Every structure is written in structure tokens, then in C-alpha cells.
Image (cartoon, rainbow, N blue to C red):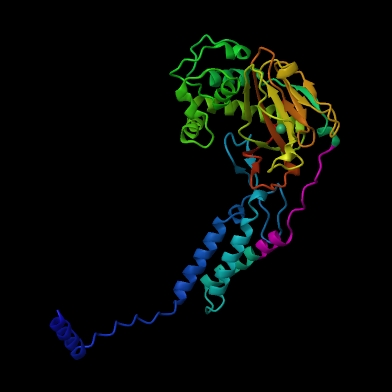
Amino acid sequence: MVGSELAGSASHALHPPEPPPSPPAALPPSEADLLLLAQLDLDQAFATCPFTFIGSSHSPSPGQGASPGQGAPQVVTTPERVYSGDQADLLPNAETARRLLLSALSRLKPLPPSPLRASLLSKTESLLAYAASLLSAPAPLPPASLPPALRSTRILPHSSFPALHSSLSALLFARWSSPPHPPLHLLHTLPHPPSAPPLCPALLSSLRVSGARLPPKWSRLLKPGKRGRQGHIRSFRASPEYGAFLEAYRRFVCEEVAPLVGDARGVVYQCPPTLRVVVPSGRAAGKPHRDLDYPGHERTEINFWVPLVRVSGSSALHLESAAGVGDCGPAELGPGEMLRFNGMELLHHTRANETGSTRVSFDLRVIPRSYWRNDFGGKMGDYDVEFAVPPPPLSG
Ligand SMILES: [Fe+2]
């Protein structure tokens, strides 16, 4: 072993290793390279909103700036007449576009004059001026409080009850009960088939809160954060019944809620809504609160509470008559009615439902589009938001 090491050492001394080849000297980018890179920067800036819309008949010209509400609509979901955002929501990307344009400018300026350079330089400088105008003149913040007319508590009629009721009934009875189904308010009278938990997690949770004896294997669907529960929620949201309910809900917001709010720019609203199922029991599921007690809420939110069954006494929502008064009482509503109230500031809660009837309801929050600050990155509490504008008036 030692001889071998000595021999190796001697051989190394006689033949020193070749130095690694030095990398070829980097060639400076050619004029063609720089023109191409500038073009790529420019293309990327164009692909970054809001420049995407330059040239459309709705868009501001470069250098003119933009104000909220201008620009081609960005379709959020279908049908586009109903749910659309607008270019103003994309303004933060102007800063990204500006950086790309400055990069293009730095590539172009040192180059010798040529028709292509002149063309790219002209586009770049024009768009830079436009980006500067967007960034230097941000839209004024919306008002911080709503008009008093939108702040009063009101029971309002709506005509979406049949569509909401039928889609929600199909959702609640799916995979659990064969037709004919009992009325929704008697849902709790159904026996629990051990092999088929309800599709709807809110219904399953309500059965658990009520103290009903449930098959042991359903318990894995009820533990927050566990895979069983997550999978249950995923299959619920992927079901055609849930899709049909959401479609009815979106139409309800567009056709019933948005016109009531009275903002020509429409409303920003929570989607999906908060679905609640409360079977009769001696236990309350929530506690008195104001929505502002929880994170993620803007002060200009308006609450709508929509029962799908008659609610009275302990099955109704209880709320204050004025902020800070503390006199929470029930808001009694029938089918086809909804409650508008200031849930941000009014104390409200539900009680243990001791009426003998299941309560089925959903609730949502909306903000008039002109009052939305987007303080929470497109969220309203824990929920995503969508846009809705009222349908145009019928002609003739
Ligand atoms: Fe609330």
C-alpha cells in the first residue's frame, strides 16, 4: 500500500495535471441580440396588465392615465354580462410592466440608429409614460362608510326562492335520501342510513352538534383539518348539485341583491355563500358577535341573510336594533324573504334551535363596487369574492 502511494506521488510530480481549459471569453451581445431582448421585454410588458388592453376602444390612450371602471372588462366567470371585473383591479401590475420597459430602454438607447430601434424606442417610451401616469395618479380611496339608506335593517322580498330552494334541496338530500323528500324543515326526521353520509358537510356537522347517534365511521369526516373531512368537502364542492346551487346563487346576487345595492358598477360579493343547516337541538352553534370582530372584513360590507324555510323564535337570527344597544331579538322571515343588516356593527347570533323545525339558510356579504378597497387581497373573511352587475333594464 505504501509503495503504491509513493509510486503515485512520483508519477504526479513528473506529470502535473493540465489546468482546466478557461471558458471562452463572453462575447458582448450583438446589436441584433439587444434588439431581440428589448422586443422580448416589450412583449412581456404588453402581456402584463394593464397594457394588454391598449388599442381597444374602451382603453385610455397612452399618457392619458386611467380611472377605476375604465377599460375592457376582465371576465371572471360566465355569463360575462353578469360577472365581470375591470381593468382597475389590475393596476398593481403597472409597476412590473414599468420595470420591463426600463430594461428595454437600457438595451435600446446605446444602439446605433435604425428603423427597428426607432420603432421599439417609440413604443417603449410611450408605454413608460402611460405606466408613469398610472403609478403617479392612484385612484382615490373609496369612501369609508356607506350611505345610511344601506345601513338600516330591512326584511326584503325576493323572487329567487324557487330556484334556490330546489337546488339546495337537491344538494342536502343528495346521496342520503331517495325521493320523495320531506320538506326541508323536516329534514331532521330522516333516518340515517349507515352507508351514506350526507353530501353536505354543514348538514353532517349539524347532526353531530345536535347529539344524533351517527355511524362511527362518519366521525373521520367531522374532524377539522383531517384528510377525511377535507376529502368530504372536496367531493361536496365538485358535485353537480353544488354547481347547480352556486349557479342559482350567482343569479340571485345578480338579479336580486345587486339592484338593491344601487351601485351602477355592481357589487363585490362573497362566493360561495355561508351555508347553514341547524337541526333541532338544545345546543347553539355560534356565539354573539359582530363581523368586525373577525379578520378580513371591510367596514362597508352589507350582510344578507336568506332562509329557505320559515324562521321564527329560536330558529331565527337574533340581532340588535342599533349598534351597542344589546337588545338582540329574532328577525322572523318566511319563504321568499331575506334580511339585510349591518352585520359589521350590529351584534348578532343564533340560538339553540328548539323549534322542532330544521333551519336551512345561507348568508353572504356584499360591498358596493364603488366602496370596495380590496384591503384583503380579493377575500372577504375566509371567502373568495366575485363581481356582479345588475342586469340591464328590459327594453320595450
Ligand atoms: Fe356574523
Residue 380 location, x and y as percent?
A: 66, 40
Total labels drawn: 0
Residue 235 vertical placement versus 281 (above, below): below
> Residue drawn 16% across and 86% down?
6
Residue 192 among those drawn in magenta = no
**Segment colored magenta:** 129-147
Answer with left or right where residue 231 lies relative to residue 344. left
Residue displayed at 80% across by 33% down: 346
Is residue 141 shown in magenta? yes
- Farthest residue in the bottom direction? 14
* Image x and y of residue 281, in percent: 64, 17
Report which quarter residue 105 is drawn in.
bottom right
**Residue 219 percent coordinates (x, y):** 49, 26
Please state the quadrant of the image where ligand 1 appears: top right
Residue at screen point 50% across, 32% down: 229
Q: Does 173 appear above or below 119?
A: above
